Amino acid sequence: MSNICVIGVGYVGLVTGACLADLGNRVVCLDVVQEKIEKLKKGVLPIFEPGLEEIVRRNAEAGRLEFTTSYDEGLREAEFVYIAVGTPSGNEGEADLSYVAAAAEQVARRLAQPLILVNKSTVPIGTGDWVADIVHEHRADDVEFAVVSNPEFLREGSAVYDFTNPDRIVLGSTNRQAAERVAELYAPLQTRSIITDLRTAEMIKYASNTFLATKISFINEMANICEAVGADVLEVARGMGSDKRIGPAFLSAGLGWGGSCFPKDVKALAHIAAMHGCHPQMLRAVTEINYDQRKRVIIKLRDVLGSLRGKTVGVLGLSFKPNTDDMRDAPAVEIIHYLQNEGAQVRAYDPVAVASAQKILKNVVYSETPYAVAEGADALILVTEWNEFKQLDMQRIVRSMRQPVLFDTRNVYDPGKMKALGFIYRGIGRGYGHNGQTH
Ligand code: NAD
C-alpha cells in the first residue's frame, strides 16, 4: 500500500486515482475546481466514463479514496504525486504547460518528505527536466525527489478497462530506482513495463498518438480515393488489415479523429519538430486530411440537396466518439457550424453529451430521441457511432423524413439495405462498385 496524491481529476486523473485506490493504495485526488470536488465527495462524477462511478464509490466507502482542493491535505502523506492536469493547445499548436507548472510549483512549496513526481500528462519532450527545475527552484528545504514520466494510453469510453489491461506501462526517468518504484505500483496489473529515460518516455507518447492519427488519416485518404475510383474502403481496410504487418486497428474510414488528445498532440509534436529545425511535413498532412474530412460532409450534402439554406438537418451523435460526453474538438461541432453557416436548421440527439454540447453550440434544437431528430428532416447525418444507433427502426425513420437523405459518416449501416428502404444513402469511401450504390 502506498500513499498517492493525484493532481487533476479529469478523464485521466480520476480514472488513475480511482484505479490506483482499487489496487489497494490510499489515494487523495486533488483539483482546483471546487465544484468537481464537491460533487465527487457526494459520489457524483463530473464526467461520464463507463464503470468509473462504481469504482469511485467502492473505494471512497473503503476509505482508500478521498477528494480535496487543498494541496496541504493532498500532499500530507504522499509518497507519489501524479500530475494529470490538462496540456491544451496554445495559439501556435504548442502544448500549454501552465497547469503543469502551477501544479509542480505547489508541490515544491510543500515538499516535506521525499517523493516521486509522476507525470501522466502528455507533455513536450524535456518537460520532465523542466518540472525538476521548477521543484529545485521552489522547494524550501533540500528534500529529495525524483521525476518519472509515465504517459497515459487510456481511451475515453473504455478508460477503466484500459487502465487495468494496459498493453504496456512506459516509465522514463533519470533515476532508475524511482522508475522501478512506480513500476511496482502497477505490478498487480501483470503487464510489461518499459523503463527508459525521461525524454524517450515523453517521445513515446507523442509518437504513439501521432502514429494512430496517421493511420486514421491514411485510411480516410484511401476512402476518398475509393470514392473516386469505385472501390469499397471497408473491404480495402479488411484486406489491408489482415496483413500482420499492418493490423486491423485504426483503419475505420469516417470523419477522422477529434477529442482532447490526437488534435493537440499531432499539433504539439509538429510544433516541437519545427522548433528543433525539423520539417514535419507528414504530421502537417495528417492534420490537413483530418479537417478536410469534416468539410467533405457539407460538400457531399450539397451534391444531394443543392443549397442547404432553409433545410432541416438532423445530427445523430455529438460527442467526439461513443461512450463519452467529451465534446473537445468533436467533429460534430465543426460540421454543425458549417451547416448553420450555409443556412440549415440543425437538430441533434446524443445519449449523454447534450449538456456538454449546449455549452459550445448555439441555435441547435436538441431532441429527446433519434426519431424526433429525423422527423421532417431533409437529411440525417450520423456523426458519432453510439451503439444505440446501430439497431434503429430505419423504416420508421425513412418514412418520417421530408427527404430521405442519410449520410452515414461512420459506415455503420449496410448501403444496400438502406437503399432498399428508400434512403438516398451516402457513406464514406464506398464507391460505385459496391452494391451498385454511388459514393
Ligand atoms: P481534463 O481537462 O479532463 O482534466 C484536467 C484536470 O486538471 C481538470 O479537472 C482541471 O481542473 C485540473 N487542474 C488544472 N490545473 C490544476 C492545478 N494546478 N491543480 C490541480 N488541478 C488542476 O484533462 P484530461 O483529459 O484528463 O487530460 C489530462 C492529461 O492527460 C493531458 O495532458 C492529456 O493530453 C493526457 N491524456 C489524456 C487522455 C484522455 O483520453 N483524455 C488520454 C491520455 C493522456
Image (cartoon, rainbow, N blue to C red):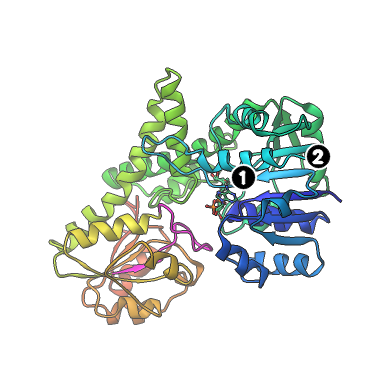
Query: Could you classify mark 2 by the number of other residues whose Cα lies within 10 Å: few (under 14), some (14-19), or many (20 or more)?
Result: some
Q: Residue furthest front?
A: 140
Left or right of 355: which side holds 6?
right
State which quadrant residue 208 falls in: top right
State which quadrant residue 158 falls in: bottom right
Image position, residue 295 (x, y; %) = 27, 50
Residue 17 shows in this picture: yes
Q: Residue furthest right?
A: 1
Q: Nearer the viewer, residue 262 or 296?
A: 262
Image position, residue 76 (x, y; %) = 77, 50
Left or right of 430: which side holds 5?
right
Query: Is residue 327 found inside the magenta-colored segment of the image?
Result: yes
Q: Earlier in the sequence, mark 1 or mark 2?
A: 2
Element marked by disc 1: loop
- Residue 113's mark? 2
Q: Name the dominant secondary structure of the magenta segment.
A: loop
Q: Is mark 1 within 8 Å of ligand 1?
A: yes
| Quadrant location of the C terminus in the rendered image | bottom left
Which residue is label 1 attached to? 153
Instruction: Provide the residue span drawn in magenta.
Output: 314-329
* Residue at 29%, 80% in the rendered image: 375
